[in-house]
Structure formats: C-alpha cells, structure tokens
Amino acid sequence: MSAFPMFPLGTVLFPSMPAVLRIFEERYLVMLARVLEDETSEFGIVLIERGTEVGGGEHRFDVGSVAKITQLLEGEGFVGVVAEGTRRFEVEEWLDDDPYPRARVRFLPELVWDDAYQPLFDETEKVVRRSLAQASEFEEQRWSSDVELVDDPVSAAWQLAGVAPIGELDQISLLRAETLDVLLTEVQRLTLGALEAITSSLGDDDDDLDDELREL
C-alpha cells in the first residue's frame, strides 16, 4: 500500500482507546497538516523501543494502531490532538523520515466476538477493576477502577487491555493477539502478574494483599 504517516511515541495505543497528543515539532506539524487534508484524518502510532519522540534516531516496534483524529486543541506553541485508536497494523517497511516518519503497513484482522466469551470477559473485567483499585494504593494510576467501558464487547475488550495496570512491553504483546479469547486470557494473566510484582516489592509481611491476589 502507499506510505502511511507515522507518529512514534513512548506509549501504546489500543483500538477504542483515546490518545491526547501535543504536537510542536516541525516534522509532525507538517504531518498533521497533510493528514487533515485527507477525509479519514488518520495516522499510525507505534511504541518507541529506545530513544525519544524528538529528533529521530529512535528504534520502533513493528506493531501499532491507527489513530483517527476527533478533535484539535489550540495551545501556546503546540497543537493539541485528540484521537481514537481504530485498526491494528504491522509495519512491513519503514520509509525515509523526510519530511516525517512514514511506513508501509499491513492491517491486522479484526477480532471477532462470540457469546461463549462472555464469562471470560466478565472475569477479565473483574480482575482489571480490582487490580486497578489495589494498584492505586501504591502508585498513581491513569485509570480508575470504575472507568466506563463501551457497550460493544470487542471494543470493551480492547479497553480492558488499555486500562489494565501493566507495562508497555506487555501491552505490545496484547496488541498482537489473534483471537478475542486469547486477548482476554492474556489481559488477566499479565494484570495479575503486574499486581503481584507491585505488592511483592512491599515485602512478604502483607498477608492481606496476598489473600486478595489469590481471590482474583
């Protein structure tokens, strides 16, 4: 396919999750202007493996999500962009960064819901919400345990992946999920593992937390 505009970031974007960006670097302002000329107003977001968002030279992961612009915000010295994750993709080839990062990508298949997944979904939601509540006792969390999910179950599953208190490398593994049941199962496993790592760092004397983890 033709070159797709790309925005490497230090965070992972999931389908059905929001992204709020502050764009001030010249190359990304150029990218934004050209993206807005297209009716779809889309660009790709991938996680930076090392380096920074500014100045180029970063090492990028090869899987990401399309961000669809939903709102522009004016700021002093920057342009604010509100976008929502849509389709997932794999990068097949990185192109020249002049005038801004671009890549040829392959879009990944959409995940498919089956009513048989409902018990797994319900259990995963329970694990994520309880883990968010417990993790917030030890460090600030971006998402609260009562965060609202959309009605569509596939989108809601991606939102559970997006709000779960896990690290970026774990998020990348979730972004590669090939089926919805695998996604939900892995969200549970990685969430419990991350919470256990947080609580174990407090020492072995907190039996109440250990009991709560076992209940999850």
Image (cartoon, rainbow, N blue to C red):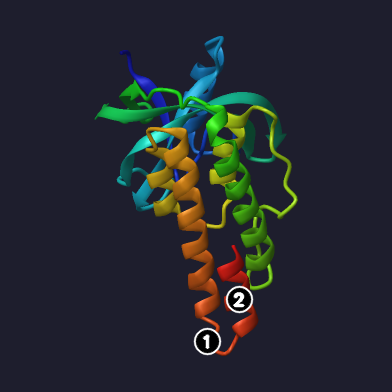
Q: Residue at x 72, y 47 (%)?
A: 147
Q: Residue at x 64, y 73 (%)?
A: 138
* Picture quadrant where residue 107 is located: top left
Please report contact status of discs 2 and 1: CB closer than 8 Å, yes or no.
Answer: no
User: Is residue 107 visible to the viewer in this orientation of the structure?
Assistant: yes
Q: Dot 1 corresponds to which residue?
A: 203
* Picture quadrant where residue 99 is located: top left
User: Which residue in the rendered view is the most extreme toward the left?
Assistant: 93
- Which image quarter holds the C terminus? bottom right
Q: Label 1: few (<14), some or many (≥20) within 10 Å?
A: few
Q: Position of residue 148 (x, y in %)?
A: 73, 41
Q: Amino acid at mark 2?
A: Asp
Residue 157 is left or right of residue 108, and the answer is: right
User: Which residue in the rendered view is the most extreme toward the bottom?
Assistant: 205
- Figure check: 136 above or below 73: below
Q: Nearer the viewer, residue 13 or 37?
A: 13
- Which image quarter holds the N terminus? top left
Q: Position of residue 91 (x, y in %)?
A: 30, 30
- Figure check: 57 above or below 43: below
- Figure check: 139 above or below 187: below
User: Which residue in the rendered view is the most extreme toward the top?
Assistant: 39
Q: CA distance from mark 2 to mark 1?
A: 14 Å
Q: Nearer the viewer, residue 86 or 191?
A: 191
Q: Secondary structure at mark 1?
A: loop
Q: Residue at x 64, y 32 (%)?
A: 82
Q: Dot 2 corresponds to which residue?
A: 211
